[in-house]
Structure formats: C-alpha cells, structure tokens
Amino acid sequence: MKLTSSQFLRIIETLRSDPLQGRRRTPRVGLRCKAIMVPCVESGPVERQEVWVRDLSTEGIGFVHTDTLPLQSFVIFQFLEKDQLALSVLCQITRCARVAPKSVEIGAKIDHVLSPEELVSG
C-alpha cells in the first residue's frame, strides 16, 4: 500500500492535535507503507525510488532504504493521489544506520512542503 497525499496530511494534522506523551519531542505514528523518495542531486540522473515508511511525526519521516544516504543531504518525498502527484515534501537526512546487508534505517527531518513553482525551478 502506498501512502497517499491525503493520508499524509491527515496523519500530520492528527498528530498535531495529540497530547505529547513519552520521551519524544513530537508525537509519531508507526506505519508500513510505501512512498516515493527522490534524492536531491547536483548533477546526473534523478531516480525516483520506492521506500518503506516506518514512522511519521510532525517533524520527520523514518524510512527504510537499500542504500545509505549522506547526512545533511536532502530528499523529496512525493505523495500521489489517484496516480497523480499531489504533494512533494523536502526533507533533510539526519540519521542513517545500516541494520542488514540490504536494509538501512534512515531518519529525515521535514523541511517544508514544496510549491509547484519550486518543483519547476528545482
């Protein structure tokens, strides 16, 4: 199952209204959904990659990928709605830990939702 733009927005809004419990700074929800991730690169081909989203909070996304990503680099998560691009979110990689030969747990901080103008100029 892929995480759609409406599901992403609904989860974020719900988390914003939840009271904070536990040791985390922001509430989060565990997920097991696929999403499209696009690494931001200065040159070369840009590859859309399917990743598994593990959790989502108001400040970040935890996901599993097959390769490591450089800390402080940026990625774009693209969320579809009815097979059309509906929402693109810019995130910065904050954590990257290999947990198996082909499995890397990655944490990314949400920077902002990209406007259509930013997508065209970027």
Image (tube, rainbow, N blue to C red):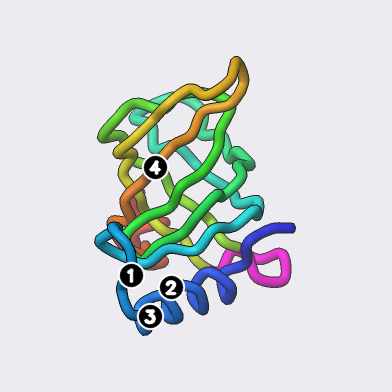
Q: Position of residue 113 (x, y in %)?
A: 36, 65
Q: Position of residue 24 (x, y in %)?
A: 30, 58
> Residue 77 versus residue 83: which sits nearer the camera?
77
Density class for disc 4 (Cα within 10 Å; few <14, some 14-19, many ≥20) is: many
Q: Quadrant of residue 111?
A: bottom left
**How far apart in space, not on screen, are marks 3 and 4 (Cα)?**
21 Å
Density class for disc 1 (Cα within 10 Å; few <14, some 14-19, many ≥20) is: few
Residue designated by label 4: 107
Identify the magenta region. 80-86
Residue designated by label 1: 21
| Quarter containing the N terminus | bottom right
Task: Using the image, determine if residue 85 lies above or below residue 35.
Answer: below
Q: Position of residue 87 (x, y in %)?
A: 50, 66
Residue 83: in magenta span? yes
**How far apart in space, not on screen, are marks 1 and 2 (Cα)?**
16 Å
Residue designated by label 3: 18
Residue designated by label 2: 12
Q: Nearer the observer, disc 3 or disc 4? A: 3
Q: Earlier in the sequence, mark 1 or mark 2?
A: 2
**How far apart in space, not on screen, are marks 3 and 2 (Cα)?**
10 Å
Q: Secondary structure at mark 2?
A: helix
Drawn side of residue 80 relative to residue 106, left or right? right
Please report the residue visible at 43 percent of the width from the left and 73 percent of the height from the top. 12
Please state which amino acid type lies under the numbered disc 1.
Gln
